[in-house]
Amino acid sequence: MKKYIMALDAGTTSNRCILFDHDGKICSVAQKEFTQYFPKPGWVEHDPMVILESQLLAMSEAFEKSGLSPTDIAGIGITNQRETTIVWDKNTGDPICHAIVWQCRRTAEFCDSLKEKGLTEKFRQKTGLVLDAYFSGTKIRWILDRVPGARARAERGELAFGTIDTWLIWKLTGGRVFVTDITNASRTMLCNLETCRWDDELLDIFGIPASMLPEIVPSSCVVGEALPEMLGAAIPVAGIAGDQQAATFGQTCFEAGCAKNTYGTGGFLLMNVGSEPRMSQHRLIGTAAWQLCCERTQYALEGSVFVGGAVIQWLRDEMRFFSESRDAEYYACKVKDTGGVYLVPAFTGLGAPHWDMYARGCL
């Protein structure tokens, strides 16, 4: 009897694979960091093929460490960095450009133009989101407008859009399954939070053909099988959730009013608000929390801080203040106070409640 679950954690700076037994005990963990590209101030990119390759390497290493084989795995669950945008050719499976990462600010001016048209409230009411470069919709439009020939190819139905979950599932299933779950869909600015479906009016505002978009499915359901030639066995893909919603579920915030705050690349506070979407009066965002198979969607309010653990990585890799992340606390404890010096890590703007797309890091 297959008793193990494979969890893929496709993060912003690394990909992990964790194998769990039937009792929830971790059998093995493997992690692979990948390159961050910063072509201009405020721009952040990833190579989609490297994301795939590093995830496959993590999976292979996890098997090697545990002594398990692909035939021991009952199912795969995927949790992922949200909003990061990949557009690829449906026929070849090749990305047409680098992925635009959720932190990227390149679409700030387009967001301003939407605000000037008086569309802020329309987006808030339909999607629960603020008009900010954080979300996927403006990134898709940027790719269609800036990559030569992309818009014409999209209008001919040749291109696919996906967040990281969609990209990995497409590749693992050999292009047979083109889906995303409601938690990731709700971060695109294209999904109606009430209906949990793509919104034609919003697609028209962005100029995005509906043929580019994946099918929206529940967070917990079998969507297809990874091909044997990819992993060595046909393994069901049975769970999808954006990383922060997955953490909310994992921290057992099952009832309205329960909240969690987790720290990874950024810091994200989410509170379960029940089975009806709620709109914040204090510049938080509304989002889908999860949807279990055959059950109603659960919703959350979120406060998003873009840079959390990433500032430690910056101090380590760019400033070279220390060689290992854990040394940050060691050195911080060596001084009595800041001496009046503060670092504002607004490297990719400020999230809630300021939503300042033009803020940058400063000392």
Image: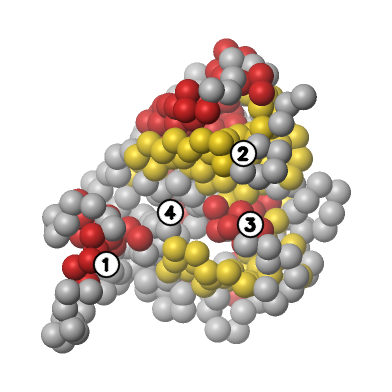
Residue beneath the point at 22% across and 72% down: 332
Measuring from the top left, give residue 300's x and y in whole percent: 66, 68
Residue type at numbered disc 2: Phe
Residue beneath the point at 55% across and 53% down: 243
Q: Is residue 287 visible?
A: yes
Mark 1: give few (<14), some (14-19) or many (20+) Cα within 10 Å: few
Asked if residue 166 lies left or right of residue 316, the reply is right
Q: Which residue is mark 4?
A: 102
Measuring from the top left, give residue 77's x and y in whole percent: 63, 39
Could you say whether the residue bearing mark 3 is in a helix, strand or loop? helix
Q: Earlier in the sequence, mark 3 or mark 4?
A: 4
Verify CB contact (< 8 Å) between mark 1 and mark 2.
no
Q: Which residue is mark 3?
A: 250
Q: Which residue is mark 2?
A: 20
**Label 1 to label 2, Cα distance in Å?**
31 Å
Measuring from the top left, give residue 279's x and y in whole percent: 66, 76
Verify CB contact (< 8 Å) between mark 1 and mark 4.
no
Q: Which residue is mark 1?
A: 329
- Quadrant position of the N terminus in the picture: top right
- Quadrant position of the C terminus in the picture: bottom left
**Label 2 to label 3, Cα distance in Å?**
14 Å
Visual colour scheme: secondary structure
Front tag of 3 and 4: 3
Residue beneath the point at 66% across and 27% down: 73
Q: In the image as oriented, which residue stretches furthest toward the top?
A: 229
Q: In the image as oriented, which residue stretches furthest toward the right?
A: 294
Q: Earlier in the sequence, mark 1 or mark 2?
A: 2
Verify CB contact (< 8 Å) between mark 2 and mark 3.
no
Residue type at numbered disc 1: Glu
Q: Is residue 141 visible?
A: no
**Label 3 to label 4, Cα distance in Å?**
22 Å
